[in-house]
Image (cartoon, grey):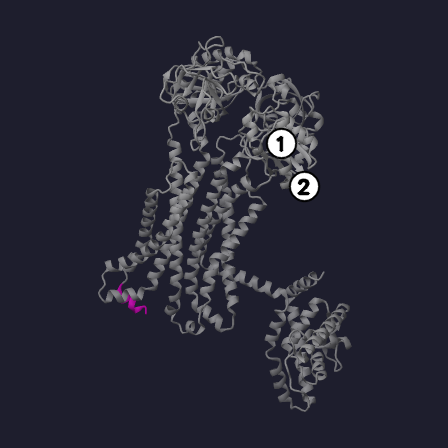
Amino acid sequence: MPDKPSDLVQGTLEMLVLKTLALEPMHGFGVALRIEQISNGVFRVNPGSLFPAFSRLERAGHIKAEWRSTENNRRAKYYVLTDSGRKALKEETREWGRQIAAITRILEA
Amino acid sequence: MRLLRPFLMGLKALFHKDQRNLELDEELSGFLEASMQEKMRGGMSHNDAVRASRAEMGTMETVKEKVHSAGWESLAESIWQDIRYGLRQLLRSPGFTLTAVLTLALGIGANTAIFTLVHAVMLKQLPIANPHELYRVGEGEYYCCEWGGLEDSWGTFDYPFYKHLRDTNPAFAQLAAFSGGGSSFNVRRAGSTGAAQTTNGEYVSGNYFSTLGIQASLGRLLNPSDDKPESPTAAVMGYSAWQNHYGADPSIVGSTILVNGLPVTLVGIAPQGFFGDRLNPNPPELWIPLNQEPTFEGEGQKSILNSSGDAWLYIIGRLKPDVLPTQLQTQLSTDLRQWLQSERQLSKDDLADLPKQHIQITPGGSGISSFRSSSKNGLYLLSAASVLVLLIACANLANLLLARSAARQQQTALRLSLGATRSRLIRAVLTESVLLSVIGGAAGLLLAFAGTKAILLIVFRGAKYIPVHATPSLPILGFALLVSVLTGVIFGIAPAWIGTHADPQEGLRGSSRSATHHSSKPQKVLVVIQAALSIVLLAVAGLVTQSLRNLEKTDFGFQTQGRLLANISFKAAGYKPEQLPALYEQLQQRLEQVPGVRSAGLSLNSPQNLCCINLNITVGGRTDKWIEDTNIIYNRVSPHYFETLGTPLLRGREINEHDTQGSQHVAVVDESFARKFFPGEDAIGKSFGILLPGHGYDYQIVGIVKDAIYKNPSVTQSPALFLPFTQTTEFAPSGYRRLETGTLYAQVIQLSVVGAPEGYEKAFLNALASVDPNLSVVNVKTYTEQVAVQFNQERLIARLTGLFSLLALMLASVGLYGVTAYNVTRRTNEIGTRMALGANRGDIVSMVLRSAFSQVAIGLCIGLPLATLIGRYLAHQLYEVGRFDPLVLAGATIVLSVCTLIAGLFPARRAASIEPMEALRTE
């Protein structure tokens, strides 16, 4: 049974998208599905936030888009992580770790 | 790179909008499809899956909108939309647009024109390299002390001190000096037969041009090797003189020209636009090395170059980068005090004043300008007045926009209810107002260009060369743009805020009356402000005009009607001092033979023209300190001088032909001289002399003339003494000896004629030429014109503040009219009801007028005290205008009231002509 859906922490969506794409290039729905599955259904990504996030990441040069055909032979836009995206992911993961550790310390104090 | 990529991608998105849209559509429907299939795989029926996926996604358009607004280009796009929308709105109501653009053009144009002046006079640096590095040693204008003496805060120096500073002070990378007073020279090309040109010249140190950092436009400029006593005489000519007098002939460079009859090599032409080291209507056009000064002024005692104590040089230099001006100031002051103690024979009084002597370091990049300091206050006043006009214009436009936004209330309500955010609506209104003001600003620039030209003609009336250009430069354009945008925001912000404050429900209910109710208060407040500001402007204009009238009506103590005058240089024509008395007599006789000439006179200085040598005197047998401290105007005059000028002789006699070197040395003094030094006694027969030991009995007073106003009427006039050209006193070597010979050269010729003086110019010039063709005069003018020129600035300020206050009045009246008319329309129903209930037309007219007058009355209550305050502040800058002038204030109030009456009467009559039945029917 999946956990109850919850809102994403502000500003983390882009990091999750980068992480998801780090495994392999994917199309929009693939990313949304993967995030939902891995988070055990806690995070459900709304297209209304997902696609602007793609657009921002693409602008920043962290990902790039190419049209490819899917497993069932339809055209879909696949997003690929770039080198700068990989760097950004590493940076954000480290920053996230720091923050989580700090928050945990505060909560356990 | 980090900023470039988003920018480029944004541009791409803008230009390939359709393609991007299609791609997004495809991507989104793919997403929907995949999501649906995933749900069906999880066991949902087809229909449920479709519904659930759609619900998750929301409308496709919303998602697309969100993606669009993620980039900067969507903002740019919506601003562009606003601009196009604004333009359409403006085109749709051409009457409104035209009124607004005209109002703005007047307001912005006035400000830009004044700013052009302020920029040229106050802010603009000299056309030289790195002007901000230049510093001047000392401050103040050239007024003291060519004849020696301590200056307290020093501004001019003698040549030995300059050399001392240049050679010993390590703080300056370069230090240049140039003469404070101009000299005029007769210049002609060697071997040419053309007439000599009278040219203003300046003595400068050899490093003058390299210190300023400018390059020759042709040939070379002066360098230190030219500035040595043994160097061949070299000179540099100004660009405009080269163009105007020598047709820009390049062959003149390197050739020999005759300056005051002496051969000089013209080594080069100064760059175009270089007008010397200060802003000056008659700038120098010839630069000669300092060390050539003795060549032109005469060797030995006549030359000022090597004499100690004659402060005739300005010093300007480039500081080394690490030097602090404040530190340097202290160090220079110490240096100066030591120098004075060791190099000068200081009197006991001087020694007591020694600790007061100091040097200030002042920024030198904008030059030294008496024009600047004298016009500063006037320019500030004009700037303030033009800003007031703009504010009133802003209030008018705000009013117009408020009325418009009230009319658009329903539309606004509809847009709000359709989901437009308020900030977006405010942005749209502001875009429209900024658009208006930028168009108005462009029109204002044209107006400013024409206006500045007219202003310059008034300011520099009678000038040879106008060092200020009306053509807008980059700073002017920037200023106009800035003012336009600011104006747009200022007058747009209130209507934008209030106009978008609509309750969608109320707006849509269709009752436009309730919605417009709110906006009449801000309109009234704006009218009150306009009235207050206009009364201030009117009062100021009244005061300034009063001051000008007082100046022009001043009793100058001489006649301006039927008088002609011209400046002349006998020195430049090559005369030696001993030749002068005979020449003057011959010249005077020749001039007086011209038919219609009543009399002719020569003088060193003349009132409202060339003024003045100031010095101190000693009265024989008296030792009072106050006598030594009194400033006296020193002048030399020919026989018939007072008669020619029309200055009444009160007692005794004029200077006449019998006053010769051999006879008793005499002086004529003016009334205040006699009253000051010989109160209660007869000054005739008393003796006095120049302030030097043993000279207390040099001159015997033979005549007393009425006071004539030599300087600007608004400054305190000093007592004056007049000596004949024919008598000189032997002084010990000192500045006074040079004064004695230097002042033998008359500089002004006056004629008193029958009929219009303009017609005598030709006869006058012919008479001069028949005595000596080498004599050239400059500035032949009628005395009326000469005096008028003295008040150029006051006249400009009076005319412009007058013009501005008229503009303000007009704008305020239009504003008042607009608001009153608008309210009458709004209250049609109410008025109809009142009339139906028995009010007669008179009641209605008075009701409308009462409302108009009540706004103006509040404006007066604010404006009058403000005007009084400003009048007090201005009083010291004005001439014989009291600190409180009830007449001016009353006049301003009456003018404003009349305008209110006119502006209120039209709407009032319309209100009175409303037919009750009709009015009620429009409900």
* Marks 1 and 2 share the same chain: yes
User: Which chain's residue wears label 2?
Assistant: B
Question: Residue, x 35% and y 52% (percent of image)?
Answer: B860
For image coordinates 38% across by 30% down, the residue present is B554
Please give the label number shown on residue B323: 2
Q: Position of residue B675 (x, y in %)?
A: 38, 23
Magenta region includes residue B34: no
> Which corner quadrant holds the C terminus of chain B?
bottom left
| Residue count near mark 2 (Cα–Cα under 10 Å), binned few <14, some 14–19, many ≥20 | few
Residue B10 is marked as: none
Earlier-in-chain disc, 1 versus 2: 2
As measured in the structure, the alpha-carbon distance from the residue carrying label 1 to the one carrying label 2 is 19 Å
* Residue B904 shown left or right of residue A85 in the figure: left
Main SS class of the magenta portion in the image: helix
Q: Nearer the viewer, residue B233 or B630?
A: B630
Q: Which corner quadrant of the image does residue B23 belong to?
A: bottom right
Q: Residue B79's spot in the image, x, y percent?
A: 56, 62
Q: Which residues are magenta?
A: B915-923
The image shows a total of numbered marks equal to: 2
Chain under disc 1: B
Tag 1 residue: B336
Whether residue B807 is visible to the viewer of this picture, yes or no, is yes
